[in-house]
Image (cartoon, helix red, strand yellow):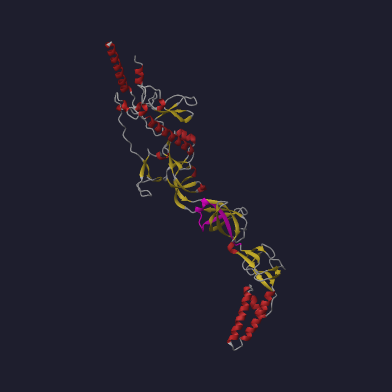
Amino acid sequence: MKKLILAAALLILALVVGFFAGRLTTAPEPEEAAPTAENGRKVLYWQAPMNPTEIYDHPGKSSMGMDLVPVYADEAEGQADEGQAAGDQEAPKKERKILYWQAPMNPTEIYDHPGKSSMGMDLIPVYEDEAGLGSGGTVRIDPAVVQNMGVRTDRVRRMDFSRMIRTVGEVQYDEERVYVVNAKISGWIEKLYVNFVGDEVQTGDPLMEIYSPELVTTQEEYLLALKNYRIAMKSTLPEAREDAQKLLASARKRLEYWDIPPEEIERLEQTEAIKKTILLKAPNSGVVVDQNATEGAFLKAGQDLFRVADLRTVWVHASFYDNEVPWINVGQRVDMELSYLPGKRYTGRISYIYPYLREKSRDVHVRVIFANPDLDLKPGMYANVMLTGKTIPDALVIPTEAVIHSGERTIVFVVRGEGKFEPREVKLGEQGGPGNNYVRVLGGLLDGEEIVISAQFLLDSESRLQEAIQKMLSDRAKATTPAVEPSEVMPGMDESAPADSAGAMPGMDESAPADSAGAMDESAAATEHQP
């Protein structure tokens, strides 16, 4: 009986020693966990052929039942080529190429030389192997695929930057050259010399004759004051002469206040003949644009009779959108064309920019003055207005089609060699240039850099996809890293095992990924098959 117990103890001891010996000798190193194809290339992950975002860490079938396709490490973005053997000597390090210098607090503030940023901080270099890390990673695409995608490029350039703005304007009267003729005395219209709207008048031309009993009485009073003055001038009393002179001046002033011309007052003094009517004359040259007088009608003092506008100068009211206002200045030259007179161009100047935005049309009102000597420009006409904005000298510009607006940021793809494209966040300014097809760059690009101007949306999709894949791989690598290295596990010390491995079957590899549960360690499998 004692011999049987001793034999059983020896057998159990042999099994325990064999188990730990096999675990220490057959545990795989972390670097060998990745599957390897027959040609020696390292498989980074397995991908569904119809869905690039569906990836696995082992071969098999996709969700559509298709065989998964291996993605090798030397083809993935950001992965180094692992073709070197473990015992080979390291290749000599190549000199890193600096692409540009960047402000540490503002990634869009870049320079082509070292120095200080706008905040006074030292610029940091951005190397060629680091380019694009801050904006999603450099995209690598086969040159043949690039050609099939129809990728076109252009250069960041400098130019004298301006903008041509086209809008619609309306010809209106020059409000500073509009005059109103009214009567300062009540009476009846005896004779009318201007009978219709649109009649042209010159300064001093007769407009109408008015009969007013008050005017007749005032003329009589003026003649009496004149006779009294002539008699008083012969008197030896200074007071009499002074009173007569004041009375005559008062009567004359009353006639002048009623707009009686000085020549009419002189005629009255010379002839002493009282006229029944008063003649109203045009104060300025122009066109009668409004008439409120009829021959024989009674009029009241202060009633507007005519409105005369001088059309030798006109205003054109043009509308500009709020984003076009920075290009506009008072005194700026404006060209104008009319559909009524094709081939003829007029030149004017901006006289005033109204200081408010019209809410309904969401535009800014601008007043332009044009000379109109031939009276071709008639109020009420619509005109095509063209304005060349102020020039920004030596501005850094790119084509507008090169810009991707994602809402949160603005991206431009920079060419970094054959098949390599770097997404770069930029800061933009005004839009303009030839055909308004360029935009000014305020930060993020350097003069002479080559940028993509077509198919950049495909590049952006590829960049986001590669960024998502790299993030998934990084998260998975962190999740599958063991808490304790195998070399640190001491035989027989259960305290070193991870907390989440409690209850693990003997022989199960604790460093295996969570999604590969069920894969048995080779040493465990060998132990299970022992008799």
Q: Nearer the viewer, residue 458 or 65?
A: 65
Q: Which residues are magenta?
A: 311-335
* Residue 68 found in image quarter: top left
Q: Nearer the viewer, residue 500 or 306?
A: 500
Q: Looking at the image, which residue sits at the far bottom? A: 236
Percent of width and height locating residue 128: 38, 39
The quarter of the rendered structure image containing the C terminus is top left
Residue 98 shown left or right of residue 162 in the figure: left
Q: Nearer the viewer, residue 108 or 55?
A: 55
Percent of width and height locating residue 160: 46, 51
Q: Is residue 418 visible?
A: no
Quick check: 176 above or below 8? below
Q: Is residue 359 visible?
A: yes
Percent of width and height locating residue 151: 48, 38
Residue 101 shown left or right of residue 293 in the figure: left
The quarter of the rendered structure image containing the N terminus is top left
Percent of width and height locating residue 272: 67, 80
Whether the magenta-drawn stretch holds residue 470 is answered as no
Quick check: 391 above or below 71? below
Whether the magenta-drawn stretch holds residue 324 is answered as yes
What residue is at 69 percent from the left and 63 percent from the top? 196
Quick check: 507 above or below 389? above
Count of numbered marks = 0
Residue 377 shown left or right of residue 75 in the figure: right
